[in-house]
Image (cartoon, rainbow, N blue to C red):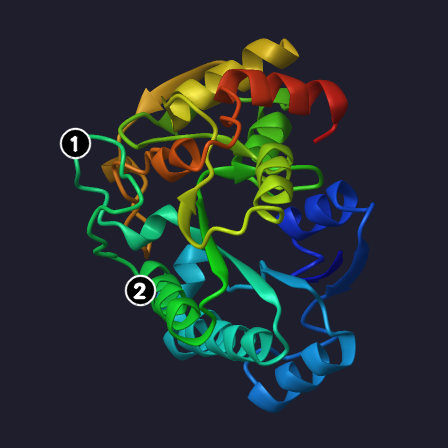
Amino acid sequence: MKILITGAKGMLGRTLMARLAGHELAGVDVDDCDITRAADVREMLESHRPDAVIHCAAMTAVDACEQQVEDAWRVNAIGTANVAAAAHAVGARLIAISTDYVFSGELDRPYHEWDPTGPKTVYGATKLAGEHAVREHCPNHIIARIAWLYGPGGPSFVHTMLKLGAAEGEALKVVDDQIGNPTSTLAVAGALAGLLELPACGTVHLTCEGEASWYELAREIFALRGLKRDVRPCTTREFPRPAPRPANSRLENRALRLHGLAAMPAWRDALKQFLTEHPDG
């Protein structure tokens, strides 16, 4: 299969390039194509003529999106619309990566794929607009929502904790009132490899099974690596950020089950595998 991956130099993009190496791959990033320019995107897709496009390119710095609002809309909304329209024009299947931030984070249970959206941040709003564009412009699509991502090379929360945990200093304070599904790019890439073979369309959640707070994740990282630095729980209010973080980022992989695909791994198992295979992150 000929597959074109946007955002190929990002954390998920790099993992996908490695995981899908058995296919004919074209990895592009911002230096190769400006996705906010429709003509450039159309020319790129017409040149490569892929069977499938995995669209990872995005402005993902949540706080920066609050401060660079037009840039966020340009990349995440218009850029995604350009990729979707160009993919449809060349007959390519599109897998677009989205996020838990399309939800409000106020629900008292994990969100499934058919729950109402309601983003509270610029990042979430622009990614939701990108989802709408994919549905409108490229019927042959999968929208894959992911959350709390880490993977080889980072950057991610896991990499930050590995660095801070190995350093000397006072006890680290880590937020304990935000809950989500820590998710490895290795697990996501494996699931996406399966979705490439699936003729169904729609939205799927691809997070590792089980839930944790950031504090619980930090404790697990330290335990697996034998890091002795003290870590203590704190509240979100103690660490105000430009973009509000959702209290509930949990996603239920309901569509994955309904499609009969393999379940995502438990988050602790995925983290252990990651740290074993990539001890330096």
In the displayed structure, 73 sits above or below 238; it is below
Quarter location, residue 51? bottom right
CA gap, disc 2 and disc 1: 21 Å
Q: Is residue 2 visible?
A: yes
**How many numbered discs?**
2
Q: Amino acid at mark 2?
A: Ala
Along the horizontal axis of the image, is 265 left or right of 181?
right
Q: Is residue 20 above or below residue 43?
A: above
- Of 240 and 35, nearer the camera is 35
Query: Where in the figure is residue 70, as x and y percent of width and height?
Result: 40, 79
Q: Which residue is mark 1?
A: 108
Q: Is residue 237 left or right of residue 157?
A: left
Q: Nearer the viewer, residue 101 or 245?
A: 101
Q: Residue at x 71, y 41 (%)?
A: 153
Quadrant for residue 73, please give it.
bottom left
The residue identified by callout 2 is 125
The quadrant of the rendering that contains the N terminus is bottom right
Decide which of tag 2 and tag 1 comes sooner along the chain. Answer: 1
In this view, the residue in front, 181 or 133, is 133
Mark 1 packing: few (<14 Cα in 10 Å), some, or many (20+)?
Answer: few
Amino acid beneath label 1: Asp
Q: Tell which residue pokes out farthest to the front in this image.
A: 199
In the depicted view, which residue is nearer to us: 24 or 139?
Answer: 139
| Image point (41%, 19%), residue name | 216
Q: Secondary structure at mark 2?
A: helix
Q: Which mark is residue 178?
A: none
* Secondary structure beneath label 1: loop
Residue 8 at x, y percent in the picture? 70, 58
Q: Residue at x 61, y 73 (%)?
A: 91
